[in-house]
């Protein structure tokens, strides 16, 4: 079993962190993982992306052209990467910032109003955690309890933000179940 996901958005949306947390959760499950971030002008507001490959056998190449899943946090990312998702895959769309859909009928879409939900929780900064947990619940790519613990562990040095991120995690799970 090998599954690939691409997280994409603009710099500052927590794209690399979301992908890193997913990779950590898979590692804690004993799976093989490749995490490949993209650095460059993305850090100045351009499109940032990161790929994660998870497998139960050794990964031949961490480079993927056609991911099984896409998490798109902004419209340029959806337009650039959705055409590459494998048929039967899932595209998670931050519907707060993306008013369009992929226009593909061979994939599933999960609409997550991440920014709106994050603002309702108190800060837009947790939008990536909402989308991450919604993606994990929808895809089944990793155990969500393990992922939840990885989120807690990541913010261990900032204990004040753990409750907020746990609320964000729970909200994402709820959205995926609707």
Image (spheres, helix red, strand yellow):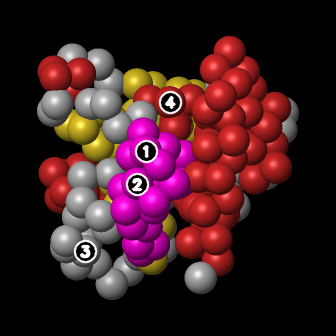
Check residue 124 for magenta coloring.
yes
Kindly identify which residue carries mark 3: 101
Q: Quadrant of residue 59?
A: top right
Lower position in the chain sequence, tag 2 or tag 4? 4
Q: Position of residue 164 (x, y in %)?
A: 61, 43
Real-space CA distance between mark 1 and mark 3, rounded to the nearest whole angstrom: 25 Å
> Is 119 placed left or right of 60 in the picture?
left
- Tell me the number on the disc at residue 17: 4
Does the stretch in magenta take in 108? Answer: no
Q: Are marks 1 and 2 in contact (CB under 8 Å)?
A: yes
Residue 74 is situated, as x and y percent measured from the top left of the image, at: 24, 52
Question: What residue does disc 2 label?
Answer: 119
Few, some or many C-alpha atoms within 10 Å of disc 1 (few <14, some 14-19, many ≥20)? few
Which is nearer the N-term, disc 3 or disc 4? Answer: 4
- Mark 2 touches mark 4? (CB < 8 Å): no
Q: Which residues are magenta?
A: 109-132
Q: Is residue 24 above or below residue 108?
A: above
Task: Indicate the secondary structure of the residue bearing disc 2.
Answer: helix
Task: Where is residue 14? Give x, y as percent.
Answer: 42, 34
Residue under the point 65% across and 28% down: 160
Q: Nearer the viewer, residue 60 or 124?
A: 124
């Amino acid at each position: 079993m090998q599954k690939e996901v691409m997280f994409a958005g603009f710099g500052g949306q927590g794209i690399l962190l979301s992908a890193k947390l997913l990779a950590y959760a898979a590692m804690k499950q004993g799976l093989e993982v490749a995490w490949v971030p993209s650095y460059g002008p993305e850090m100045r507001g351009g499109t940032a992306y990161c790929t994660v490959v998870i497998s139960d056998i050794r990964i031949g190449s961490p480079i993927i052209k056609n991911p099984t899943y896409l998490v798109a946090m902004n419209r340029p990312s959806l337009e650039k990467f959705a055409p590459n998702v494998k048929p039967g895959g899932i595209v998670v769309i931050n519907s707060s910032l993306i008013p369009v859909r992929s226009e593909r009928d061979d994939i599933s879409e999960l609409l997550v109003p991440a920014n709106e939900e994050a603002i309702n929780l108190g800060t837009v900064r947790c939008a990536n955690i909402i989308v991450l947990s919604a993606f994990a619940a929808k895809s089944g790519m990793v155990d969500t309890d393990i992922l939840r613990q990885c989120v807690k562990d990541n913010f261990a040095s900032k204990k004040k933000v753990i409750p907020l991120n746990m609320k964000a995690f729970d909200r994402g799970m709820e959205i995926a179940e609707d």
